[in-house]
Image (spheres, coloured by chain):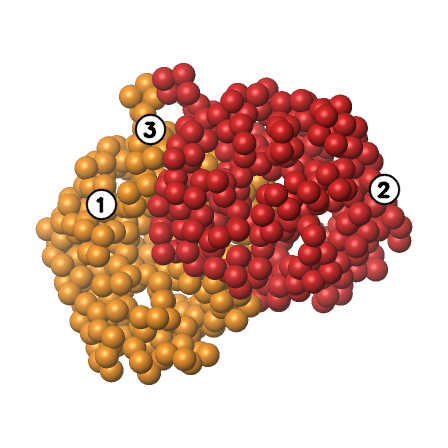
Chain colours: A orange, B red
Amino acid sequence: MNTAALKAEILKKKSFLCVGLDIDLEKVPAQFQNSPTALVDFSKAIIDATAPYAVAYKPNIAFFETYGVEGMAALKEVIDYLNQNHPEVFTIADAKRGDIGNTSTRYAKAYFETLGFDSITVAPYMGKDSVEPFLAFKDKYTILLALTSNPGSADFQRISSDGTALFEKVLATSKTWEGSEQLMYVVGATQADALQKIRGIIPDAFLLVPGVGAQGGSLEEVARHGLNENVGLLVNSSRGIIYASQGDDFAEAAATAAKNLQEQMALLLEQNNLL
Amino acid sequence: MNTAALKAEILKKKSFLCVGLDIDLEKVPAQFQNSPTALVDFSKAIIDATAPYAVAYKPNIAFFETYGVEGMAALKEVIDYLNQNHPEVFTIADAKRGDIGNTSTRYAKAYFETLGFDSITVAPYMGKDSVEPFLAFKDKYTILLALTSNPGSADFQRISSDGTALFEKVLATSKTWEGSEQLMYVVGATQADALQKIRGIIPDAFLLVPGVGAQGGSLEEVARHGLNENVGLLVNSSRGIIYASQGDDFAEAAATAAKNLQEQMALLLEQNNLL
């Protein structure tokens, strides 16, 4: 799936919502607890309930990998379900991988080919030859960590030299890499002050924005600084949707939470003359 | 396994060799090709052949993960084999993970508990709250990327502000984190010029050093600047050992390559009055 198809889907659903599948088995409704297929069953129920309002899904790989072989089998079932039953959505492996050349190629194959995701999140610390191997895969996208939403983002990402913060260098440098048109960027919603600056460096790229809701970021702020003429935004919500209720009505509650965000997004798209 | 036990093993084997299991199924000897159990069988053969000369093993997770569920099952077999048949060696999951708090905890559980590794490599870009969750696991070690051996290490790791390079800030800052006594660091052998500076910042920590051999680093240089009173070094070799021969004599050739490095290491340990 390419960004033109993603944009078309955004305009059709009037939504730039990404649903984060951070499935914590201690937080799922009682009916799923102690079930060996809980990861898959709960994910499928959330996907079906929210698909009218979401254009992207982002399984958090750690929450599957933590269960070893069984977890990876569950992840495969979830991505297969997305590709078969909701082929119109954009899929993101939130894996934050990154290693030297031939190793990055193996990670890219794992997520783009073996599993069949449209995109993967990647950490930039090791530089050009750790990211370009991901960009060599046609019609696949690499979502580079730029400025994350956690407190630790201040430790290194905001270190400044010659007036330029590390995350700005990551953005500017990554534009020079082979295949950079397949780059997207993670920018935390808790860092809305930086969004305008970020858009100045990468006006065209899609931004994946976590941190709206539970972590305190404002959707209006993100839209004001982040939207571009191709929308260029995916805003992620995880806990606010998947744990909207932990009772029997969890799917309805998830749908309602997703719909609420979709309606706010529709308004923002309209206000910005994008519909 | 803790660092005191690791040091004892180093002195016993007179070796600080780590064997990197970057198992490329296109490069394994013909007898393993087209076999569904090649990853496991080849790994076991290499481990058994080299165990007299090596104190650590480092499966490269990407080379397993690229095969999806089957790859993860193979990884589980390899780490179980190491823990059961060679409990004296230090095991490293070369995974380069790192994410916000509760996600990092999931990755730590995956590698420390579900799989049973002694340590994992972690990327520092997301800062303190992405690394401390790994450090919360007792007698487990987190090997933080500091200065890597690839060309792309120049892109961000060597960016300087106020005369201090990013990798030096990573080293200095990480010392302040809760559980920092369980930190080790990846420092590429191709960056021997920086090793002395690095030892000034972290005199006591173990360094995991890739890049000797195939990537051009010098063992003597690494030992000169990297050894400390507790040895404090693990030098990794992957291709030079596991593909020493691609014929029927691959295991013998791997043993010989490992023994050659061990003998050089024994001499360096002796010259530095560590034996």
Specify the quadrant of the image occupied by residue B6: top right
Q: Nearer the viewer, mark 1 or mark 2?
A: 2
Residue A190's disc is 1
* Spatial separation of the CA atoms under disc 1 and disc 2: 55 Å
Residue type (three-letter) at the residue carrying disc 2: Thr
Name the residue tied to disc 3.
A159
Residue B184 placement, left or right of B20:
left
Disc 2, disc 3: CB below 8 Å?
no
Label 2 neighbour load within 10 Å: few <14, some 14-19, many 20+:
some
Provide the residue designation for mark 2: B256
Question: For residue B19, which quarter of the picture?
Answer: top right
Where, quadrant-wise, is the N terminus of chain A in this rendering? Answer: bottom left
State whether discs 2 and 3 lie on one chain: no
Q: Nearer the viewer, residue A148 or B119?
A: B119
Q: CA distance from mark 2 to mark 3?
A: 47 Å
Q: Position of residue A256 (x, y in %)?
A: 18, 71
Q: Nearer the viewer, mark 2 or mark 3?
A: 2
